[in-house]
Image (cartoon, rainbow, N blue to C red):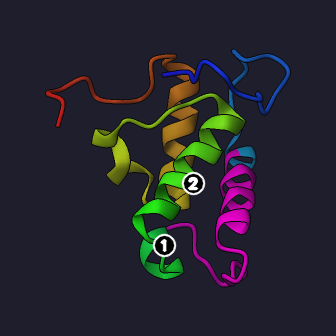
Amino acid sequence: MRSPSYDPLVNNADATLQPDEVRTVVRESLARIAPDAEFDALDDDADLAWELRLDSMAVLDLLTAVAERTGVEVPARDLPQVATIEGWVHYLTDAAVAPDGPSSGGTAA
């Protein structure tokens, strides 16, 4: 779901986010949240919280930072889908196709 107050990554809020744009947004957001982390060796499939030793507040900060940049909020039921950078790529590019977000629409957790 689109955040009501966000600074869009692109001029057109309906534009499709490209995978490289998503990777940049997530990595830039992580760099602000965990400035001492080493991102050069971080694989796109690595569990971000585990590899970067992010606590729950840092994960919340990441969710907020990405939402502010992209306008896409991640509901709690979708947190496992954005555990990795590659997960963020899929989630946000799917969100561009489905404006209410990529959730499967099953039962809410």
Q: Position of residue 106 (x, y in %)?
A: 18, 26
| Above or below for 66 versus 84 | above
Please report the residue visible at 34 percent of the width from the left and 30 percent of the height from the top.
103
Please report the residue visible at 48 percent of the width from the left and 80 percent of the height from the top.
53
Question: Is residue 5 something one can see in this rendering?
Answer: yes
Badge 2 amino acid: Leu
The C terminus lies in quadrant: top left
Instruction: Using the image, tell me which numbered label, if any, was put on residue 54.
Output: 1
Badge 1 amino acid: Leu
The secondary element bearing badge 1 is classed as loop
Q: Which residue is mark 2?
A: 62
Q: Position of residue 38 (x, y in %)?
A: 69, 84
Image: magenta residue range: 22-45
First-in-chain label (2 vs 1): 1
Q: Distance from label 2 to label 1 (Cα)?
A: 10 Å
The secondary element bearing badge 2 is classed as helix
